Amino acid sequence: MVARAYTVAFVGVEARPVEVQCALSAGLPGFAIVGLPDKAVSEARERVRAALTAMAIALPSKKITVNLSPADLPKEGSHYDLPIALALLAAIGAIPAEEVEHTVSLGELSLDGSLVAVTGALPAAMAAAEAERSLVVPRACGAEAAWVGAARVLAAPTLVAVIRHFTGQAPLEPAEPGEVREDTGGRDLADVKGQERAKRAMEIAAAGRHHLLMVGSPGSGKSMLAARLPSILPPLTPQEALETSMIHSLAGLISEGGISRTRPFREPHHTASMAAIVGGGRGAKPGEISLAHNGVLFLDEFPEFPRPVLETLRQPVETGEVVVARANAHVHYPCRFMLVAAANPCKCGHLADAARACSRAPGCGEDYLGRISGPLMDRFDLRLDVPPVAFTDLDLPDGGDRSAVVAERVARARAVQAARYEGSGARVNADAEGATLEAVATPDAEGREILLKAAERFGLSARGYHRVLRVARTIADLEGVEAVRRPHVAEALSYRIAGVMALA
């Protein structure tokens, strides 16, 4: 007799079904796990054996073979402990085999039989719902998995509780979803004194999800501005929250089962490796660009990042998806994020101040910012010079509009875009392209004239031309008008051409 249990294997954000088959046969007593398991899965036999011994359940003196099917799919992680134990218990007749076959399970076993939390409960619940099966997870994962309302999620503290559930002695109650959290960190845009042009650029970037580059001397407020960007972004929609939470679930970033409506804000250090930024490593895990999906990726000291790391951003910024290809893995992760970068104008940071600049000025500025390639620079919608803050600005009583006021304007603009692009695949102006962009962002005659003149004079690329149109469309949305006019195009050009002139 072959007993079966079901679990999942994670390939990117996809949870693929895995059938756990357990057979008892005559021969020398042994416990073998086959089906391309990694070290953690192979060690499951010792954890399962110890957990059953702690519950006074003796294994039969037979050869035990556990097969993880499909056998050519790599199996990684400790979440196979529970399904292996259930398949074994069904094989020896301790629990009804037909009950086990109607569930998907995952969880790590302690030596005393308690269940330890694992990553990926949310994608596993999605797979269980598609297969029309219940999901059994450790108690610590129940609140997270229960967010998938289509799945019946059962959270158990121990293997004993799972056995009692399947034997009808003490059925488990369905888990309840965790709390919805909304937290902006208490940082307000009004904390920033001066820098009104930078605040305006941030508002435009937030409204249309445009990529932003800030260049300025040390202490001008670039990092302070970026840290307050989440406070003006609208909360995640239910669909976006589910997409983002599935990635964070695989990375183990969901605490106590709570789903956050706040958009992700990731700020990796410039010493981060390519695998940390793009994804990869053992198991091809998601990188920072995927963890920032539907949110913000802030790269401070932008030119200090290794050149290969920066160049890998070019394709994900355009496509909104990254493919991590390895010898034993080829996975896709979504990464539709807003890239915000900050840089000093040169190595010493005081290029514009002759009294404080180093002896290599102005050549040091060209060398320093030259680390950013032209194709990557072309992908920034807004390029902004952030001047030093005047001491008179520091004495001002407040810093202009508070984040709540700016967030309302951003939310209205995002609502207009959501209605405009409904059913088209785009969500915000940054996604518009081709015929859709021409239909919604073609400026009036005066706006078109100034755009063509600027494109010819400053040598805008085709990508730059279209990005100006997207920014102009966002500016018009913030103003609440339907047509893109000359002032909108002029302001959009000012953010792009100013950056070109400053970096020339």
Image: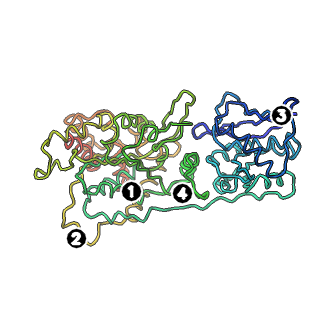
Q: Can residue 72 be seen in the rendering of this structure?
A: yes
Q: Are marks 3 and 4 in contact (CB under 8 Å)?
A: no
| Percent of width and height locating residue 132 | 75, 44
Secondary element type, mark 4: strand
| Percent of width and height locating residue 370 | 25, 36
Secondary element type, mark 3: loop
Q: Is residue 457 left or right of residue 16?
A: left
> Where is mark 4, residue-wise?
260
Q: Nearer the viewer, mark 3 or mark 4?
A: 3
Secondary element type, mark 2: loop
Q: Are marks 1 and 4 in contact (CB under 8 Å)?
A: no
Give the CA separation, mark 3 to mark 1.
62 Å
- Nearer-the-camera pick, 170 or 467: 170
Q: Nearer the viewer, mark 3 or mark 2?
A: 3
Q: Is residue 482 left or right of residue 58?
A: left
Secondary element type, mark 1: helix
Give the CA separation, mark 3 to mark 4.
49 Å
Q: Which mark is residue 395?
A: 2
Lower position in the chain sequence, tag 4 or tag 2: 4
Q: Which mark is residue 282?
A: none
> Where is mark 3, residue-wise?
29
Q: Are marks 3 and 2 in contact (CB under 8 Å)?
A: no
Give the CA separation, mark 1 to mark 4.
17 Å
Q: Are marks 4 and 2 in contact (CB under 8 Å)?
A: no
At 25% from the left and 57% from the top, the residue drawn is: 219
- Nearer-the-camera pick, 341 or 56: 56
At 26% from the left and 56% from the top, the residue drawn is: 197
- Nearer-the-camera pick, 375 or 434: 375
